[in-house]
Amino acid sequence: MVILVSSCKSGLGDYDPTEYKIDSLLSVMTVEEKIGQLIQENGGQGHDEDIKRGRVGSVLNEVNTENINRLQQLAIDSSRLGIPIIFARDVIHGFKTIFPIPLGLAATFNPELIEKTAAIAAMEAASVGIRWTFSPMIDVCRDPRWGRIAESFGEDTHLQSLMGEAMVKGYQASALNRQGSIASCAKHFVAYGAAEGGRDYNTVSVPENELRDVYLPPFKACVDAGVATLMTAFNEVNGVPASGNRFLLDRILQQEWQYKGLVVSDWESIPQMQTHGYTTDLKESAFEAFDAGMHMEMNSKGFAEYLKELIDEGRIPSGMLDDAARKILELKFRLGLFDNPYTFPENFPALLNEDHKEVARQAAAESVVLLKNKGPVLPLGAEIHKIAIIGPLANSPHDQLGTWIFDGDKRDAITPLESITEYFGSSNIQYAPGMEISRTKTREGFNRALQAAKNADIILLFLGEESILSGESHCRADIGLPGAQEELVQTLSETGKPLVVIVMAGRPLTFEKVLPKIDALLYAWHPGTMAGPALRDILFGIECPSGKLPVTFPRHVGQVPLYYNHKNTGKPATDLTWERMDDIPAEAAQLSIGNTSHYLDYGFKPWFPFGFGLSYTHFEYSDFRVKPAEVSPGDSIVFYASLKNTGEYAGTEVVQLYIRDMVASRTRPVRELKAFQRVTLEPGEIKDITMKIHTSQLGFHNQDMDYVTEAGDFKAWIGGDSETSYELDFSIKK
Ligand code: GLC
């Protein structure tokens, strides 16, 4: 007997409200069928029998539309109740049209653009039958050793929140049943980016107030934006694995946030609770996860094998099973899968169409951060007639796509070599990789590189990391330029030719000591399909770089964790108090006065600070004001400044507003980003900037774990990076 539940089918009558449909469905589902909805299988092969028995709620990693439709037909026509399947995929920064890695997207400081990229990714994924992506990844990360920093939006909670929210809106649009909408998934709940030592999956110990003030807000922003699902993290949080953590899944998500969406495990994160040493076996892992608030299990079989037993034993109330199955059914109804379960790609815009590629070019161009421009040597001017293009990342279509590009194809990628050669003329270009890949340790390609440089007016040197050197479990203890790249810089600098370095990488890298040999430095992250056209436009001044760093660049990996919104401590260092290692006399006496928090060898400052990025033009800030300078709790505060383009290029500045609560019942960071806006100015143009925040944005969790905004004095800074000196005072009165 097949019972079809749909607004347009007879049998069970007209079920207008979705809840009524779901209640009707649940009333006839067996326990096995309800459990079946909680199971997510991997890949589209080998699950036919389970699908027919109604024991598969979702399939991930099947992207062949013919097979997706076949499996869907099996679920609808051959299972007893005909409940459709949700097909899921990691669509992290694009499906076929690949955008910059999320760390690069963050560097745009352009949420509106990021929303567009997510909408395009959703349209392309939905066109093959994918209706659920495991994105956005919104793990705040202060440790560039961690491979998945590439996949995050960096170290700042506010930026991470806005970017996560933008992606949710882009993926889900106004309704999940619209053509091209897919369910999104905020991950990894929570604090996965705080893994000890930047080692993936590693231990996370974070005090509750820091969880609530740093790591949880991006998830709350996504929940408030209507994110359809959440994924739990692999790591433990303060001794309890996230996938069985009642404080997270019940207290925070259900009781405090009243979250109504679906919670899915990460890949086998439920059985991993036994590996963590938290459960004795798979049955206990299934119990701990389900009892804590997990609704669906990715790939592993805890729920499939033990939930019925746990219910029969009375350890899991059958009502909890209904609640979990309801979440999945609600999502399927919201996606319109009961009414339109099949995919017809011909009804969608073409993959990789020109509009999609233009947005990818724009995102890649806006993600590029100009870190140095001596001369200025950039943009390339009319005096340049011959260009040497060198380096392992000048023509690597695979690596420029970055990590997590399951469906991106390097054959669609346009490399910098291709775009620059096409634009500048092949007769004016000399190309030599210099190194086969980023990890090449030998100098055997250096001579050819020198030959290419010999007749050139300028060297464009593309360095960095292959894409596989970041991403899941691909962490690095030494975050320098891999292989012989620094030697290649040194060798090419000896030609005396102007040297422009363009870095593609999945994280900040440390190569400060060769910076003096470099005339201009562009940081392009992994820019995606349209890396070539984007970098062509930046290098030739068709686009003016506007990217800003979403993460601090340390001088040395030994400084990590190093981030801008740090605490002041009781003995902060200054340039005056930094005791430089080489200045210490032999047999110096150990004193305990005048000491401050720093490293003898690498001091206390970053190489480049959060929010930093240069332009081809110059911006001048003036006329700073804050009104009112004294506010009451619950008021808004408006900050003003004037911004002038004093250079000769049109350009875009990301104006940033930082605040500091000078004295509070818990110590507060020395700076916190609270607002930013992109301002585009023609040469000579002046604009008045207004930035408004609410006193509620100045709060934190106090010793009683209440979120409070306390009265007292505050400072504010407005400028182009987190070290800007343009300072304002304001206060909140009692
Ligand atoms: C991975 C990742 C997660 C991803 C999932 C499915 O291990 O941690 O982010 O969505 O498995 O591929």
Image: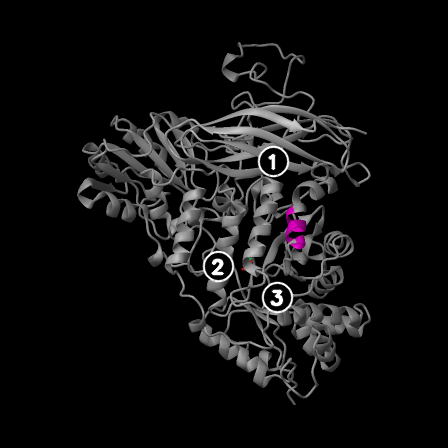
Which residue type carries mark 3? Ser
Observer able to see residue 443: yes
Report the magenta residues as a range.
218-224
Give the residue at mark 3.
300
Was residue 223 drawn as part of the magenta stretch in this picture? Answer: yes
Q: Quadrant of residue 442?
A: top left
| CA gap, disc 1 and disc 3 | 48 Å
Give the residue at mark 1.
691
Give the residue at mark 2.
121
The residue closer to the viewer here, 189 or 720, is 720
Q: Position of residue 134 (x, y in %)?
A: 56, 59
Residue 557's place in the image compared with 165, above or below, is above
Q: Residue at x 40, y 31 (%)?
A: 683
SS at circle 3: loop
Q: Residues within 10 Å of mark 2 (few under 14, many from 20)?
A: many
Total marks placed: 3
